[in-house]
Every structure is written in structure tokens, then in C-alpha cells.
Image (cartoon, rainbow, N blue to C red):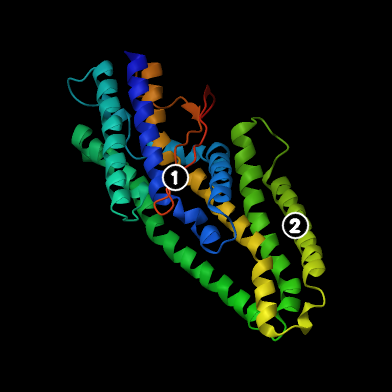
């Protein structure tokens, strides 16, 4: 019976993750494919690698939030006349229902070509089953408030940073009389900033999720490593740009802009991979959080989630709505502190 429950939950988790890909894949690779920086096949491969890396390295905290941070599992034990076994069964049924309902909604939305939030879907589904099964008090509303606040903060912060970055590129490089020379000067700073963001998230948060007891990897050491790597990335990019664009400032401005666009191709690819990495780190929890909760309840026989859940890095077939392409994340299930 336990194997059957986990099998059904795993299939629903895969179905949910597949639908996340169907609706969200354009968030990371649409710019790279649309600008022809990458072919569809190249984008599929890079997205698969980066999504998987983000899910495994940095995805555990978000998974824990969906697993036990929205609905308090202890509230099921407080229900009158409900035994531990009944509470566990109720919790499993609720999480399975949340997975199924969110996945079906995403499937319908993707079929109709409607971009919707996968996080909204699963968070609402989990909170909904909690209210029905254990009452309003079962939902951890302070955590819900933080999640809902992020839905407003994220687009505002993203829009502001995109505005600032585009204004910088436009004024410092594209709007200059000799854009190729300006690119040699200013583009390496953009490369350094992107490198710093990815490296810091990967080595400080990511390595701790894979390799435990790294006592030497303190915040200070992580920042130092990040600074060194980002500086090296900036220096390397400046050397490459100088080799590519040196002496091109004598060409007509239109041709210089074309060359600048060409040298920005690697930056577009890197940023697309960064978005894919971040998406894997954040949205993998929408499929794996409920699944991890179900597996933990089945393993322990109780809804108590004080102990860690299984280490899960799970992915799915990504369906490109426009291109009908797909890729698969690998999955693994081995006990760990997560």
C-alpha cells in the first residue's frame, strides 16, 4: 500500500513538474531563442542542465516551505476524534489533491496559451485543502503573507532592475558615438555582476545542500571567492572583447552596433542560464514540496514534519508551447537532512 501511495504521488509530481515546464519554460530561454543567440536544441540542453542544478543545489529551502510552511501538519493531530493514522491519511489525501488540482489547472492554462503562476497555483491548492480539512487556523498565515508579498515585490523589483540595467547599457554603450569601444570598457562590468550573482548563490547556498559540514565555507569566504571569480570573469571578458572589437570603432555606427549585438550574445546566454538556474531553485518546490511531504508521512507514519524530508531533485518534460520541444530533469531520492 505504501508503495502504491508513493507511486501515485510520484506520478502526480511528475505531471505537475511537466506542467510547470509547459507554462514557465519561456521565462528562461525565450529571449535567447527569440534573439537567435541559441537554437531550440541548444536551449533545451542548457535549460535542462541549469534547471536541474538549481533544483538540487539551492531548491531545498523552498521545498521545505511548500512541504510544511503553508499548512501546519500538527493541526491535523489536533482534530477531535482523529487518530494519528487518520491524520496521516487525511494529510496525504490533501497533498495529492493539491498536486492534482494545481497540475490540471496548469495543463488547461498551458493548452489555452495563458501564462499563469505555478507558485500561485500550488500554494493556493495546499492552503485550500488545509482550510477544508483542518480549518482556517491550520494555514500559517504569516508565511502566506510573506509568499503573497513576494508576488508583488518580484515584478516590481524585476522591472526596476531591468529599467536601470537597460538605461545603463543604452547610455554607456549603445548611445555612444563609438559603441564598440564603449562595449570593451563597460560590458565586462555586466559580466562580473552576473558572475557574482550566480557564483554566490551556488557556492554558499548550493554546496551546503550537497556537501555537508563545510565549516570553512563561511559567508566571508563565500564573498571572497565570489569577488575573485567575478573579477577574473570580467578580466577575461575584457580580453575577449578587445580581441574581437579592437580597431572596429572606425566602422560606421550601424555596423558597430551590429558587432556589439554579436558580442552580447554570450551575455544573453549566460543570463538565460541564470534565470533557468533560479527557476529550478524556486519553482521545483511547486512539484516536489507536496511530494516530499507525502513521502515523509508514508515513511514515518505520522504527519509530524520535524524530521527532515527526502533529498529530492526532480524534473520533468518541458513542453515548449511554440516549438513543441521538451527536455527532462533527472530525479533522485536519497535520504538526507532535507
Could you tell whether 209 is left or right of 144 in the image?
A: right
Categorize mark 2 by other alpha carbons within 10 Å: few (<14), some (14-19), many (20+): many
Q: Nearer the viewer, residue 50 or 152?
A: 50
Could you tell whether 176 is left or right of 153 in the image?
A: right
Q: Secondary structure at mark 2?
A: helix
Categorize mark 1 by other alpha carbons within 10 Å: few (<14), some (14-19), many (20+): many
**282 versus 114 height, above or below:** above
- State the residue at coordinates (58%, 49%): 42
Label 2 belongs to which residue? 233
**270 versus 185 height, above or below:** above
Visible in this render: residue 229?
A: yes
Q: Nearer the viewer, residue 98 or 157?
A: 98
Residue 75, image x, y percentages: 28, 30
Disc sitting over residue 309 in the figure: none
Disc sitting over residue 283 in the figure: 1
Q: Quadrant of the N terminus?
A: top left
- State the residue at coordinates (39%, 51%): 321
Q: Secondary structure at mark 1?
A: helix
Could you tell whether 269 is left or right of 8 in the image?
A: right
User: Which of the marked residues, 1 or 2, is nearer the chain's N terminus?
Assistant: 2
Amino acid at each position: 500500500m505504501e508503495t502504491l501511495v508513493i507511486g501515485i504521488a510520484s506520478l502526480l509530481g511528475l505531471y505537475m513538474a511537466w506542467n510547470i515546464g509547459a507554462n514557465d519554460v519561456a521565462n528562461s530561454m525565450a529571449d535567447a531563442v527569440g534573439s537567435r543567440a541559441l537554437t531550440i536544441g541548444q536551449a533545451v540542453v542548457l535549460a535542462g542542465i541549469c534547471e536541474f542544478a538549481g533544483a538540487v543545489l539551492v531548491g531545498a529551502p523552498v521545498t521545505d516551505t511548500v512541504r510544511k510552511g503553508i499548512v501546519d501538519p500538527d493541526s491535523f493531530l489536533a482534530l477531535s476524534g482523529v487518530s494519528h493514522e487518520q491524520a496521516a491519511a487525511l494529510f496525504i489525501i490533501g497533498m495529492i489533491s493539491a498536486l492534482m488540482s494545481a497540475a490540471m489547472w496548469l495543463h488547461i492554462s498551458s493548452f489555452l496559451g495563458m501564462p499563469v503562476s505555478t507558485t500561485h497555483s500550488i500554494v493556493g491548492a495546499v492552503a485550500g485543502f488545509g482550510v477544508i480539512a483542518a480549518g482556517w487556523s491550520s494555514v500559517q498565515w504569516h508565511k502566506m503573507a510573506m509568499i503573497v508579498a513576494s508576488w508583488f515585490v518580484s515584478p516590481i523589483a524585476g522591472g526596476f532592475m531591468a529599467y536601470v540595467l537597460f538605461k545603463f547599457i543604452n547610455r554607456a554603450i549603445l548611445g555612444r558615438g563609438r559603441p564598440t569601444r564603449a562595449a570593451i570598457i563597460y560590458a565586462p562590468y555586466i559580466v562580473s555582476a552576473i558572475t557574482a550573482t550566480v557564483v554566490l548563490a551556488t557556492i554558499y547556498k548550493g554546496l551546503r545542500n550537497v556537501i555537508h559540514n563545510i565549516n570553512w565555507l563561511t559567508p566571508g569566504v563565500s564573498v571572497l571567492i565570489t569577488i575573485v571569480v567575478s573579477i577574473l570573469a570580467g578580466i577575461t571578458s575584457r580580453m575577449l572583447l578587445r580581441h574581437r572589437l579592437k580597431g572596429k570603432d572606425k566602422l560606421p555606427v550601424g555596423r558597430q552596433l551590429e558587432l556589439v549585438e554579436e558580442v552580447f550574445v554570450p551575455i544573453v546566454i549566460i543570463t538565460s542560464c541564470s534565470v533557468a538556474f533560479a527557476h529550478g531553485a524556486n519553482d521545483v518546490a511547486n512539484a516536489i514540496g507536496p511530494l516530499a511531504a507525502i513521502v515523509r508521512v508514508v515513511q514515518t507514519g505520522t504527519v509530524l514534519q520535524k524530521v527532515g524530508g527526502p533529498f529530492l531533485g526532480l524534473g520533468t518534460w518541458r513542453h515548449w508551447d511554440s516549438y513543441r520541444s521538451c527536455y527532462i530533469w533527472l530525479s533522485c531520492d536519497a535520504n538526507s537532512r532535507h
